[in-house]
Image: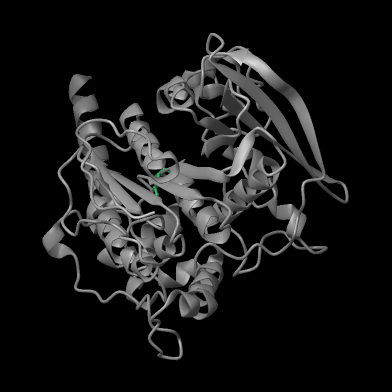
């Protein structure tokens, strides 16, 4: 019996190895590549100032990402109603007030409910705010019995009691280590989160979430250059921003959009699309997030469009194993966020996301920050693990696995403090000349 199990696991590992033999984890196997020019327009003119960047090159690049990568958002959909479920619930032993609001979207017979959970510091001042999606429901971010349970589709996870795609009490607080809310609130920031599946369930099915709101009669999926799930999530963040602008206790000029992994890709695209986001944090966002596609290290365009075709517009599949033909690379996505502060992270064991590709992309994006007289990322060599570098672009590579941890959040807070409040930085901060 034991031999059978061993044999089976050997066969399985060989199969996994066989499937994954196309994945490159060797720096020396990274092909030579030329990145598309950030600062040369389609017509071949050099972009030398912010005026030309904003008028010519930025719109060109934005359009390319819309057409070829994430897909354009084909309709205008406004919030139809805001239902306030809770205005100022007592949370974290009185440290924070909990607010729960539901954004309701309607079109014909369709209705979509998106719930925002917020924890805000107890102050009468308007507060800066972190906003980011969670993967499995708002109730997973804190062990707080008053957080409403989502009724949206959630991927099954029997170990968390998520069965038949519905959450139960068992998953309450299950992801609280990813959301150090007490620390964030103590630092003077509010934190808002939304279950990504409220906006669009993460499955290859364009029949639910927000997508059907854009369909003509008889249409069942978005057009080849129209929104995939990441663009739908980005859309949801911009709608949350519409709400924040109406909330008198939130400083909507200081909203930081943050996301981990696939949700980091969405945060980047949201910040590119919507310049009301004052800062963006991309945590381990990897392929089609911060990492350069042309390096073909770890996850590639071919792998991601095969595994998660619904994340992107259909057009992206044309570039599977043809990364060199992509008219953009991800440094251009980061550059769309300029001159707003941008923080990119990697993790030492997260080779799938290509830490070096995430770093180099952030370095390259600095070209546009410099047009604005900002420093961009102040280093060109990758810093040592757990040794953040802060310019207007910040970067760290954390020791450990693909995850978002309290360590990561502490850096986000320090980075935000540096840009928003210029408060005292914690000790051991690698500090580089920083202009604001
Ligand atoms: C992986 C995917 C990555 C990353 C990750 C996540 O399976 O290949 O691009 O987004 O999921 O979201 O956790």
Give the quarter of the figure containing the N terminus.
Answer: top left
Q: Residue at x 60, y 23 (%)?
A: 167
Q: How many marks?
A: 0
Using the image, determine if residue 180 lies above or below residue 14: above
Give the quarter of the figure containing the C terminus.
Answer: bottom left
* Residue 221 found in image quarter: bottom right
* One can see residue 175 in this view: no
* Residue 248 found in image quarter: top right
Quadrant in which ligand 1 is drawn? top left
* One can see residue 354 in this view: yes
Q: Which color scheme is applied?
A: one colour
x and y percent of residue 293 in the render?
A: 33, 64
x and y percent of residue 57 in the render?
A: 47, 78
In screen coordinates, is 243 left or right of 119?
A: right
x and y percent of residue 331 in the render?
A: 36, 64
Using the image, determine if residue 391 lies above or below residue 33: above
Q: Residue at x 24, y 42 (%)?
A: 388
Q: Residue at x 41, y 28 (%)?
A: 178
In terms of depth relative to the viewer, which is nearer, 420 or 54? 420
x and y percent of residue 265 in the render?
A: 45, 51
Using the image, determine if residue 250 lies above or below residue 170: below
In terms of depth relative to the viewer, which is nearer, 75 or 100? 100
In screen coordinates, is 252 left or right of 289?
A: right
Q: Which residue in the rendered view is the most extreme toward the right?
A: 108
Q: Which residue in the rendered view is the most extreme toward the left?
A: 28
In terms of depth relative to the viewer, which is nearer, 63 or 111? 63
In terms of depth relative to the viewer, which is nearer, 111 or 278? 278
In screen coordinates, is 211 left or right of 403?
A: right
Using the image, determine if residue 394 lies above or below residue 90: below
């Amino acid at each position: 019996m034991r031999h059978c199990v061993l044999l089976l696991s050997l066969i399985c590992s060989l199969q996994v190895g066989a499937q994954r033999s196309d994945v490159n984890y060797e720096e020396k196997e990274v092909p030579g590549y030329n990145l598309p020019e950030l600062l040369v327009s389609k017509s071949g003119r050099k972009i030398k100032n912010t005026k030309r960047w904003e008028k010519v090159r930025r719109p060109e690049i934005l359009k390319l990402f819309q057409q070829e990568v994430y897909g354009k958002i084909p309709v205008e959909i406004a919030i139809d109603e805001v239902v306030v479920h809770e205005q100022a619930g007592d949370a974290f032993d009185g440290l924070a007030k909990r607010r729960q609001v539901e954004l309701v979207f309607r079109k014909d017979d369709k209705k979509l409910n998106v719930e925002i959970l917020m924890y805000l510091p107890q102050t009468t001042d308007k507060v800066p705010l972190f906003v980011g999606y969670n993967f499995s429901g708002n109730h997973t971010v804190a062990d707080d019995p008053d957080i409403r349970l989502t009724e949206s589709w959630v991927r099954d996870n029997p170990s968390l009691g998520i069965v038949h795609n519905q959450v139960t009490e068992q998953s309450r607080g299950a992801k609280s280590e990813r959301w150090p809310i007490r620390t964030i609130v103590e630092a003077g920031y509010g934190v808002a989160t939304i279950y990504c599946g409220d906006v669009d369930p993460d499955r290859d099915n364009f029949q639910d979430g927000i997508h059907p709101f854009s369909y003509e009669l008889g249409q069942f999926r978005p057009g080849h250059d129209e929104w995939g799930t990441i663009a739908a999530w980005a859309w949801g963040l911009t709608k949350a921003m519409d709400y924040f602008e109406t909330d008198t206790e939130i400083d909507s000029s200081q909203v930081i959009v943050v996301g981990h992994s696939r949700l980091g890709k969405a945060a980047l695209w949201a910040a590119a699309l919507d310049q009301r986001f004052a800062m963006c944090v991309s945590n381990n966002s990897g392929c089609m997030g911060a990492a350069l596609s042309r390096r073909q290290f770890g996850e590639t365009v071919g792998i991601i469009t095969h595994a998660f075709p619904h994340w992107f517009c259909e057009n992206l599949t044309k570039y599977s194993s043809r990364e060199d033909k992509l008219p953009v690379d991800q440094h251009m996505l980061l550059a769309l966020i300029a001159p707003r502060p941008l923080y990119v992270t990697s993790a030492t064991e997260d080779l799938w996301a290509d830490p070096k590709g995430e770093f180099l992309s952030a370095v390259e994006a600095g070209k546009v920050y410099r047009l604005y007289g900002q420093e961009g990322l102040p280093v060109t060599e990758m810093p040592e693990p757990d040794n953040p570098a802060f310019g207007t672009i910040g970067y760290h590579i954390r020791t450990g696995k693909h995850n978002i941890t309290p360590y990561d959040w502490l850096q986000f807070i320090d980075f935000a403090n540096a840009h928003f409040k210029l408060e005292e930085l914690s000790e051991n901060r690698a500090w580089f000349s920083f202009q604001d």
